[in-house]
Image (cartoon, rainbow, N blue to C red):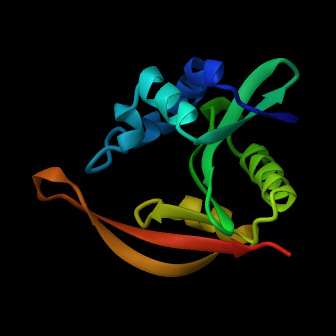
Amino acid sequence: MKVKIAEASDAPLIYDLMIKAFMEYKDEVPPSSALEETVQTISTALEDGEQALISYIGDEPVGMVRFRLTDNGVYFYRLSVIPEKQGQGIAKGILKSLDDYAKQNEKTKMLCKVRMTVPKNIKLYSSIGYRIHDEEIVHKPNGINIKVVSMEKKLL
């Protein structure tokens, strides 16, 4: 598996990988806001400081993660692996590459938020050193509330 830093021109590919991965959440209440994004919103975000890593097996793109550098850490989101490649360690490989990138940029921690209704993602992050450090309720339009945990991993 190889991982490369995305360019703004990769927005259509990032969108495609994300939508394929997040379709499993289309029936959540509410559905993931990832499903409301467009190639244009991703392109705009990439032009405005967001970054992404794209993972390939051979020449086939199989996953990605979007992120922003903060003062002392990296906040990542939309970690995506196409359904037919899930469970093969790709997400962990992408996050390992992101850890390496963070260290190269002198960042000391990794941060993410996870819906409490998706325990497999909490388990994934916990298995590679992330710890829950906060819980909150995100208030969405229409009175819908989403319980999320903030997870953090300190980099050595």
What is the x, y in percent for residue 17?
59, 28
Q: Residue at x 48, y 38 (%)?
A: 22
Q: Quadrant of residue 61?
A: top right
Quadrant in which residue 116 is drawn: bottom left
Horizontal side of 141 relative to 97 (left or right) equals: left
Would you say residue 38 is visible in this rendering?
Answer: yes
Name the residue rendered at 66%, 30% in the picture.
Answer: 84
Q: Residue furthest bottom?
A: 133
Give x and y (percent) for residue 145. 23, 63
The structure residue drawn at horizontal position 78% and vertical position 58%, both measured from the top left corner, is 102
Residue 96 sits above or below residue 137 on the image = above
- Seen from the viewer's position, the closer of residues 54 and 45 is 45
Q: Write down the quadrant of residue 135 in the picture.
A: bottom left
Q: Is residue 30 left or right of residue 107?
A: left
Residue closest to the far left: 142
How many numbered discs, if any? 0
Q: In this rendering, does residue 130 appear at all?
A: no
Quarter occupied by the N terminus? top right
Quadrant location, the C terminus:
bottom right
Q: Position of residue 5 (x, y in %)?
A: 76, 35
Residue at (40% x, 67% y) in the render: 148
Left or right for 139, reference 64: left
In the rendered image, residue 11, in percent from the top left (x then y), is placed at 57, 23
The vertical placement of 50 against 69, above or below, is: above
